[in-house]
Image: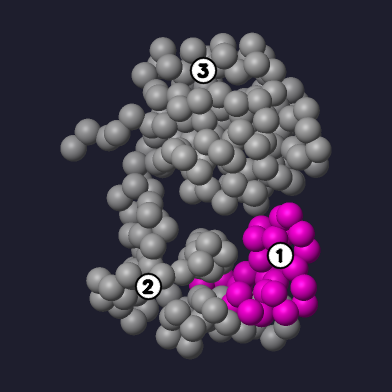
Amino acid sequence: MKNKIMNILIVEDESLLALELANTISEMGYNVIEYVTTPQKAKEVCQKHDIDLIIMDINLDNKLNGIELYKELHTQAKVLYLTSYVDEETIAQAINTQPLGYLVKPYNEAELSALLKLAEIKAHTIETQTVQLAYGYEFDIKSERLFQDGKHIKLGKKSVALLKMLIEAKGNVVSFEEIEQNLYTETPPSSSSIRTLIYRLRSSLKSDMIENELQYGVRLIM
């Protein structure tokens, strides 16, 4: 079966560069859903469209940088960062978002093409991937829905995000600090917020599937 054409969103505050990039990517055969210059517009597009890849300028002309914006989008789309430079501090900030890579301005078309092909492969893998969990549970990565023996288990947005973090950790402990940094980017959580979130997710699963590790964090028994 032929893979679908990959849907791409470009977030770049320099409109001329965004247009040039959109034209180049379209000529390569991909579907540029839109190119936007502000975080608010990026959020609106992600809410309306099924995006496979976001090409994100790190140094947006805004209080919010591209790394922080990507975290706030809570999207399954992969990210490819566009930047004028790559330093160790930037890489350290970006590493938790698991980017496909970095395009340094002015970008190289051959490098861009290679990264887009990699993104296409990963997008197709995600599209067809279901994670099998204990007790007959399975998580559909594409639709971000949890099932048990074929029955849909409804979860809130933050519960879904937490479950994805636990699945990606592959049985390793996810610290409370990591949960706070990834799921509460807009405002710091209260002392009970994270405990309540874990309780809600645990209530939707078999209670022994989520284990506490002292006062450090939690892990998923898969």
Badge 3 is on which residue? 22
Q: Which residues are magenta?
A: 170-198
Q: Are marks 3 and 2 in contact (CB under 8 Å)?
A: no
Q: Nearer the viewer, residue 179 or 170?
A: 179
Q: Quadrant of residue 173?
A: bottom right
Question: Label 1 neighbourhood size at 10 Å, few (<14), some (14-19), many (20+)?
Answer: some
Which label sits on residue 153?
A: 2
Q: Secondary structure at mark 1?
A: helix
User: Which residue is rendered at x = 56% and y = 38% of the image?
Assistant: 44
Q: Amino acid at mark 3?
A: Ala
Q: Amino acid at mark 2?
A: Ile
Badge 1 is on which residue? 180
Q: CA distance from mark 3 to mark 1?
A: 35 Å
Q: Give residue 6's position: percent from left, percent from top.
A: 38, 31
Q: Secondary structure at mark 3?
A: helix
Which label sits on residue 8?
A: none
